[in-house]
């Protein structure tokens, strides 16, 4: 049986999840659900799916964040992870596993095994390093990153840090990684991001720091055989895609089944790590490469990136509370591009909600099932259902917005069909013909529900039940 392993990045637990995180996770969920459903309509296409998300906990940012609220770091993390899981549960995210990189049993042995493989290939070496370290970034910056001597993102003067680090010989892999991306062996969606990373690879990569001294207060996975060092952010974090499957543990069954990943989903800000460092690590460790990277843009509001200082931040929880989780899922699916930056304002959200869901889908389902309840003696025997070919093709290209557009078009067309055929009149003049008309509309609605299932699963379930019970559903979406 074919497998489909899909991952989100692991998220930093020093702050709440924002709309960008909700987007990454919702898109991943839509794709995971679509792949799980494929076999229902076409048994020969059945796939085994594994959907991974999680949190990146080996970060120094946790310490000040925990201190600020007077908690121990472990307790602070428990609370934040509970919030992450709560948002994902509200959003109906059907992940199979939530990995936490602070998990010494699940994550550390695999991360250390990966390190040993890099070492065995001669790609890990120790060197004295002096650099400008920004605590906010948790990274070394170069002088050209600074504006007036400060980190432009964090507004702080970076510390000059001199320390011994282990380095990964990334420079050795520029050419091989480039060849794998150019040939499409690692497919990058969209094309523009592929070109962006290829030009970076053509310039050549520099070796990167892969550890930090414990004396600098770093927390995380200990470097095998050197108690004075812990693994550095990316080396530890990227390994989660393997360790979640049991890589380096006694039971590697999932790893054997699911690696390599079909797709890693991420925002454009972390493309470089996934398209340069990660493939290089896998090549060095002699492990298979992921098949594809889906790299989405940012959600902006009023043409600008959401930020506290601009006061244009919209919290996903706020939208879920006001409109419901499926309303947020549908907006993200239809109106946010999986490839480019997109707009979301409170006004655009409300307008889209009313048009797409309250006056669109919700009204359509109510009209059809009211007719069915009044005029059909029993539930409609549905024809064989399947994902429309165009819908599958859109999702196979990760174009979730194009797939959602097909739903919107189908809703419109079915609505026009009601107006054109006027079944409420026909049923009075010619009851048999009227019932035929209404049955056709119910079948048309069922065909839409097939497409709704991966996108807004809770609403899809409600409409299914209503069709099966031949009853008008409770109001699906109240007009706002
Ligand atoms: Zn910074």
Image (cartoon, helix red, strand yellow):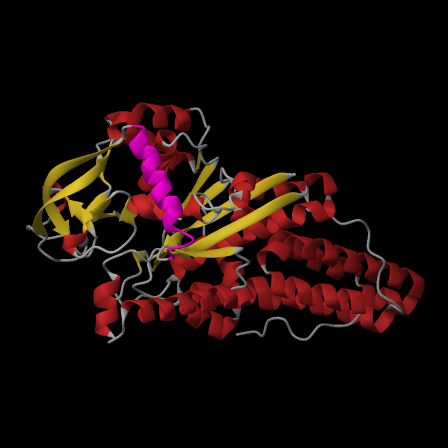
Q: Residue 251: tell me if it is visible.
A: yes
Q: Is residue 385 above or below residue 390?
A: below
Residue 80's quadrant in the figure?
bottom left
For the point 41% across and 69% down, the residue is 83
Is residue 309 among what the camera can see?
Answer: no
Quick check: is 113 in the magenta stretch? yes
User: Quadrant location of residue 196?
Assistant: top left
Q: Position of residue 16 (x, y in %)?
A: 35, 66
Q: Nearer the viewer, residue 17 or 82?
A: 82
- The total number of labels drawn is 0
Residue 135 vs 225, above or below: the answer is below
Query: Measuring 32% from the left and 56% from the top, which residue is drawn there?
Result: 303
- Left or right position of 391 against 180: right
Q: Position of residue 158 (x, y in %)?
A: 10, 52
Picture quarter with the N terminus? top right
Looking at the image, which residue is at 82% across and 51% down? 383
Q: Nearer the viewer, residue 272 or 67?
A: 67
Q: Position of residue 57 (x, y in %)?
A: 32, 58
- From what the image shows, is residue 366 above or below residue 224? below
Q: Is residue 364 left or right of residue 351?
A: right
In the rendered structure, does residue 376 fall within the stretch colored magenta? no
Residue 293 placed where, x, y %? 44, 40
Q: Which residues are magenta?
A: 103-121
Dominant SS type (magenta): helix
Left or right of 363 on screen, residue 402: left
């Amino acid at each position: 049986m074919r497998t489909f392993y899909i991952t989100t990045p692991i998220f930093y637990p020093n702050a709440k999840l924002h709309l960008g995180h909700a987007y990454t996770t919702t898109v991943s969920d839509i794709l995971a659900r679509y792949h799980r459903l494929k076999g229902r309509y076409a048994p020969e296409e059945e796939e085994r799916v594994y959907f991974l998300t999680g949190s990146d906990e080996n970060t120094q940012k946790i310490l000040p964040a925990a201190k600020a609220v007077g908690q121990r770091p472990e307790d602070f993390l428990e609370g934040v992870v509970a919030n992450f899981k709560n948002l994902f549960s509200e959003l109906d995210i059907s992940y199979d596993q939530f990995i936490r990189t602070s998990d010494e049993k699940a994550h550390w042995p695999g991360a250390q095994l990966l390190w040993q493989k890099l070492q065995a290939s001669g790609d890990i070496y120790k060197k004295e390093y002096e650099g400008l370290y920004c605590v906010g970034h948790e990274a070394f910056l170069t002088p050209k990153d600074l504006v007036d001597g400060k980190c432009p993102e964090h507004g702080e003067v970076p510390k000059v840090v001199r320390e011994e680090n282990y380095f990964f010989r990334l420079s050795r892999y520029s050419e091989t990684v480039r060849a794998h991306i150019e040939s499409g062996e690692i497919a990058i969606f969209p094309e523009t991001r592929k070109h962006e990373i290829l030009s970076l690879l053509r310039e050549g990569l520099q070796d990167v720091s892969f550890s930090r001294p414990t004396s600098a207060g770093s927390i995380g996975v200990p470097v095998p055989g050197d108690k004075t060092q812990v693994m550095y952010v990316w080396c530890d974090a990227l390994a989660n895609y393997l360790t979640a499957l049991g890589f380096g543990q006694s039971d590697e069954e999932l790893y054997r089944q699911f690696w390599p990943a079909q797709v890693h989903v991420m925002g454009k800000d972390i493309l470089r790590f996934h398209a340069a460092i990660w493939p290089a690590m896998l090549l060095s460790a002699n492990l298979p490469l992921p098949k594809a990277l889906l790299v989405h843009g940012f959600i902006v509001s009023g043409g600008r990136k959401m930020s506290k200082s601009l006061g244009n931040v919209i919290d996903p929880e706020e939208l879920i509370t006001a409109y419901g989780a499926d309303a947020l899922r549908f907006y993200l699916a239809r109106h946010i591009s999986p490839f480019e930056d997109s707009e979301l304002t409170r006004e655009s959200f409300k307008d889209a909600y009313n048009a797409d869901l309250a006056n669109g889908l919700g009204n359509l389902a109510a009209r059809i099932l009211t007719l069915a309840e009044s005029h059909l003696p029993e539930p409609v025997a549905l024809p064989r259902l399947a994902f429309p070919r165009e819908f599958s093709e859109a999702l196979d290209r990760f174009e979730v917005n194009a797939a959602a557009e097909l739903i919107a078009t189908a809703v419109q067309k079915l609505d026009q069909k009601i107006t054109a055929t006027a079944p409420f009149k026909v049923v009075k003049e010619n009851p048999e013909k009227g019932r035929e008309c209404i049955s056709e509309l119910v079948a048309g609605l069922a065909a839409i529900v097939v497409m709704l299932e991966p996108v807004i699963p809770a609403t899809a379930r409600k409409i299914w039940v209503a069709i099966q019970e031949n009853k008008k559903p409770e109001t699906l979406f109240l007009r706002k």
